[in-house]
Image: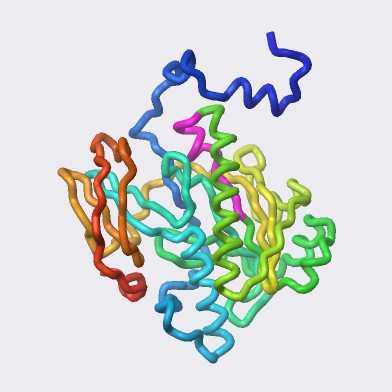
Amino acid sequence: MADSSLSVAEHFHERTKYSPETINSKAQPEWNRQPIPFKTYKLGQTYDLKPYLREISEPLSKDPKVKEAQQLSHLLIHSYGLTAEISNPPNVYYLRAAPSAGALYPAEVYIVSRGTQFLPPGLYNYQAQNHSLLQFWQDQVWSELKSACFWHPVLEQTYLTIIVTAVFYRSAWRYQDRAYRRIFLDTGHLLGNFELAAAINNYRPHLIGGFADPAINQMLYLDPSLEGRSPFCPWRICTILSKICLPVVQPFPQTLKPPIQIFRMGNCSVTCIRRLNWVRIPPAIRVGNCPIKDQPWKTSTISPSVLRSPR
């Protein structure tokens, strides 16, 4: 019988924490039903961000529209962009800039635009698999956003808002009732990435933690039985919100084929997508059925131009 003196949060943490007696009692996940870590849309307009990647030493464009696109492109790829591919035929796994429990990447990133030189008013989803933004709603929703955030004053001077969501099933598929803990760790890492990447891309982030869930669900066309939220955060021209979402399992998109293979071990290979000076695989990491031992690997220098024209 549950201890009545415990809060709901304490009861949840006690019930889901690991212990030597219960750690091996969990059912194994169905490996052939692993959820896809990308959200897809049947309709929408794509804004490709790859042409706006540049070397760190390369100055920003003097064209305001191109400069905005360069800053946004680097903000997203440094926060949640793909960094490597791990191949274990017939499966392919992608790693990202933000850490994730089990490399399941439950988070989704949305952008709400008030209307800028690069992004017209509307709703966008960050498509990490090909580093682009997909506009799935072409209309002004800023007043709905301000209402959902209880007219937070920072939104008066903000033109872009990032909303971070997390897909529950992507994590629950493996971690079951403990997934809730994993998801908030993942979204916390991602929000930290955004704050750091903002500083080097001339943004000032501001986190908003108070908002009306039903209003945000309706604005983003999310099913509240499948999706939920984390905190938000606005900046000098960009806000960040954070939510939690869960789309259905779909066929794995093969739109991105990273071109440079760094190393191969048996049937496992790791491919680098953007600049890495050193790769070190932690001990006891297992990709599918193929173990990767603890061994350092040097990499060649890879230019961001790799992403501009993928082979």
Tell me if residue 96 can be seen: yes
Front in this rendered view, residue 299 or 65: 299
Residue 221 rendering spot, x and y as whole percentages: 64, 52
Give the residue displayed 45% in from the left and 57% down from the top: 97
Tally the marks. Answer: 0
Front in this rendered view, residue 162 or 197: 197
Tell me if residue 136 can be seen: no
Q: Is residue 174 magenta?
A: yes
Q: Residue furthest bottom?
A: 62
Residue 6 rendering spot, x and y as whole percentages: 74, 20
Q: What residue span does the magenta drawing correspond to? A: 164-175
Q: Look at the image and name its color scheme.
A: rainbow
Give the residue displayed 58% in from the left and 35% down from the top: 181
Q: Quadrant of the C terminus?
A: bottom left
Query: In the figure, 33 relative to 16: above or below?
Result: below
Left or right of 41 in this view: 93: left
Image-quadrant location for residue 167: top right
Image-quadrant location for residue 12: top right
Q: Is residue 180 magenta?
A: no
Query: In the figure, 208 relative to 54: above or below?
Result: above
